[in-house]
Amino acid sequence: MGKEIGIDFGTTNTVVSYVNKSGRIRALRYDKSEIIPSVIYFRTSEEYFIGSTAKKLLAQNPSAGVENFKTSIGDSQRHEISAESGEIISLRARDAAKLFLNKIVQGIESKLVKEFGAAAGCIDRAVITVPANFSSTEKGAVKNAANDAGLENIKLAAEPTAAAVAYENSRGNDSDEIILVYDFGGGTFDVSVIQKNQGAFEEITTGGDKHLGGNVLTEKIADKILAAVNSKFDTDFPKTEDDFDEELHKISAADYRMNMSEIWRTADLVKEDLSEDENAEEFFNIALPDGKSETFEFTLTRAELEKIIGEEINRTVEITLNTIKAAKDKGVEKIERIVLAGGSSNIPLVKKTLEERLQSQDIVFSDDVSTLISRGATILAERYAEMDKLTKAVTTLQMGITAAEGMEFEKFQMLIPEDAPLPCTMKRTFYLSRDNQRRLEIDYYERDVKNYPAAKYGYDKGVEQIDSLVIDNLPPNLKAGEVKVDVTFTAQIDGSLDISVELKNLDDEKITQGNITFIKKSDIE
């Protein structure tokens, strides 16, 4: 039997942990670092780098790679990358995830084989963490990418749950208690109230915002830097490449991309600096019109930073308060402690604001927020066979469809509610719209009722189409009024979605399926 690993597959950084020969959980080093930037850089379509090397190369050639791809892993949209060789590479975010994880698996497994030998060092089982608020399609895309990267036995765990597992393990605490995990990562914010009961970790309720992470804070700092650059040099460089024009702005597209890459890199450094110090000072080169270039100095104080990002931090705290209220509505009398996880939790304003707003709560940092989640994943991977009993998850969002016609056209119709224990199943019957119909597409949605309680229609903010089910090759000569299409949606124990389809007549008798196929549109190449 081979080794088990835990993977915190993060938006900005990835950490892989395992249990070494001494029985201690250790983060594995890749490219000389335990913290692996989630970045890919393409030298050619066949040769590419990940991690720290990729991040350094991408800073010099921003068009030749991709980062932050996890945030769009559920999308089918393809992105064009211009490799260093000049080749144009078209890939989806899930393709990037596959390539990234493939390098991780190869590099990590070679180190494990050296330590444990050829048989014992091969990766046998893996637990990969995902944001609690990821959609079923996003969770499924992570599993598929990991499978395609060579990992056969995979289970997913919610990031806050893995953090709770690791924190409790580090304390050596066997007693039952209620924990709230505030997980502020690079791409997402999650908060979960988790009950530890006889060694099992059960989600009571979850909240968060999958569009609010540390990258949003970096972007706000980058906006301030860009404004300062434009003010000093009397330029009008736009924020996005869609608004950039070589002739108008008098620099090349390559120089513009380099400028924006430097601005973003500097913003990230400033954010990190101000987690430790009261003042930050960073320098970078800026390409200017007519072939000129100058060094730009940017300074920021912690007090200034807190004004810039205060709204976002307050939003995470409001979500936390709402989650605590939801837990109390479910019978939770007291939360013993709040555990901070995720790299963005290192920002001093986070703990300061939480302490001000939750005065009676015990708020604690783990010994290392950067590796906490991967350590929890490793503990679960070590107990792979019984993991489904150790962690009990709930749905984070409502899942459903929208009305296709009538007075309530496009109104959201719930199939699976929020905070429902997983796994859970719901069946829905659909009908053909015409005789001899050979294909049927069913769009399905998720509704974030906790953050957007007023959202009712498919076009409202807070209701998001997550995928479409394509049912194809229906038997010929079917009559619209005589056929039912029963679709069973099952939110599995890890939150990914399984779908099955049956054709029936009006008497509920099965119709021969023939060559019928059904597939999620996001899985179509």
Image (tube, helix red, strand yellow):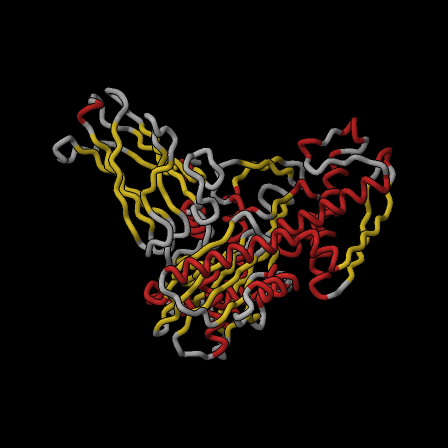
Q: Is the residue 481 above or below the residue 362 in the image?
A: above
Q: From the viewer's perspective, is 16 left or right of 49?
A: left
Q: From the viewer's perspective, is 325 left or right of 421?
A: right
Q: Is the residue 337 above or below the residue 227 in the image?
A: below
Does the rendering let one see residue 148?
Answer: no
Query: Closer to the camera, 283 or 50?
Result: 283
Q: Quadrant of residue 483?
A: top left
Q: From the viewer's perspective, is 203 left or right of 213?
A: left
Q: Position of residue 262 (x, y in %)?
A: 74, 47
Does the rendering let one see residue 270?
Answer: yes
At x 47% / y 78%, what residue is drawn? 23
Query: Closer to the camera, 115 or 408?
Result: 408
Q: Position of residue 192 (x, y in %)?
A: 45, 60
Q: Quadrant of residue 177?
A: bottom left
Q: Quarter of the image containing the N terminus?
A: bottom left
Q: Position of residue 413 (x, y in %)?
A: 34, 38
At x 25% / y 32%, what residue is drawn? 515
Query: Closer to the camera, 378 or 417?
Result: 417
Query: Closer to the camera, 366 or 99?
Result: 366
Q: Is the residue 403 above or below the residue 202 in the image?
A: above
